[in-house]
Image: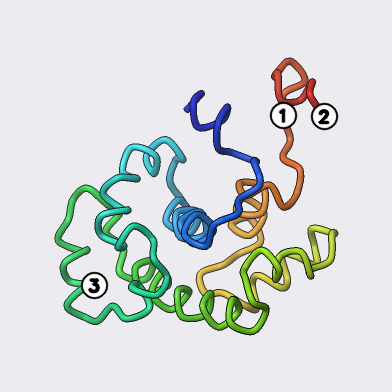
């Protein structure tokens, strides 16, 4: 957890795969601990084609069944189906804006507006999931304990 906090959480993301990975994992985390998701991250990467949205967007029922059979991931059909649909939506946004980073940069800075936009753009996306995703990729500032070294660097 400490390594994730110190090296990943809240740092700006630049790659398509990392954006899609964070978006997908935040959805799978809903109702669970982030520790559980981090523990299963390698299995998620394997099952979701290293988070290539192009590949995930082409997943079929056969892929869903394969993923549901893997105890190394969170086996929730609705979340798996959401990941596949979100890959398609993610690619449409990327195509329209030229890149996902360009899309994020075009959005307003206030959290309520961002949450509303993400809820409209993606499935299985509530306001807390949207907020966690936006914090995780450095789009909005994340709260830190005042004693945290990252809080002191701001």
Quarter of the figure that contains the C terminus: top right
- Front disc: 3 or 2: 2
Q: Is residue 108 above or below residue 44?
A: below
**Horizontal and vertical percent position of residue 60:** 25, 81
What residue is disc 3 on?
64
**Horizontal and vertical percent position of residue 78:** 36, 71
Q: In the shown orientation, is residue 51 left or right of residue 112?
A: left
Q: Is residue 56 above or below residue 43?
A: below
Q: CA distance from mark 3 to mark 1?
A: 37 Å
Q: Callout 3 environment at 10 Å: few (<14), some (14 to 19), or many (20+)?
A: some
Which of pointers 3 and 2 lies earlier in the amino acid sequence? 3
Q: Callout 2 environment at 10 Å: few (<14), some (14 to 19), or many (20+)?
A: few
The label on residue 144 is 1
Please name the residue shown 71% across and 65% down the image: 104
Look at the numbered discs 1 and 2 and tell me whether their residues touch, using CB distance below 8 Å. yes
What residue is disc 2 on?
154
- Front disc: 1 or 2: 2
Q: CA distance from mark 1 to mark 2?
A: 10 Å
Q: CA distance from mark 3 to mark 2?
A: 42 Å
Which of pointers 3 and 1 lies earlier in the amino acid sequence? 3
Which of pointers 1 and 2 lies earlier in the amino acid sequence? 1
């Amino acid at each position: 957890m400490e390594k994730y906090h110190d090296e990943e959480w809240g740092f700006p993301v630049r790659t398509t795969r990392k954006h899609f990975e964070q978006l997908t994992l935040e959805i799978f985390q809903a109702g669970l601990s982030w520790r559980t998701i981090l523990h299963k991250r390698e299995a998620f990467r394997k099952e979701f084609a290293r988070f290539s949205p192009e590949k995930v967007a082409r997943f079929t029922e056969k892929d869903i069944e394969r993923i549901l059979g893997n105890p190394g991931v969170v086996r929730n059909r609705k979340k798996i189906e959401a990941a596949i649909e979100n890959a398609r939506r993610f690619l449409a946004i990327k195509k329209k804006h030229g890149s996902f980073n360009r899309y994020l940069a075009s959005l307003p800075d206030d959290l309520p507006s961002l949450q509303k936009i993400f809820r409209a753009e993606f499935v299985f996306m509530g306001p807390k999931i949207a907020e966690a995703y936006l914090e995780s990729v450095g789009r909005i500032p994340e709260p830190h304990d005042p004693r945290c070294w990252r809080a002191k660097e701001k």
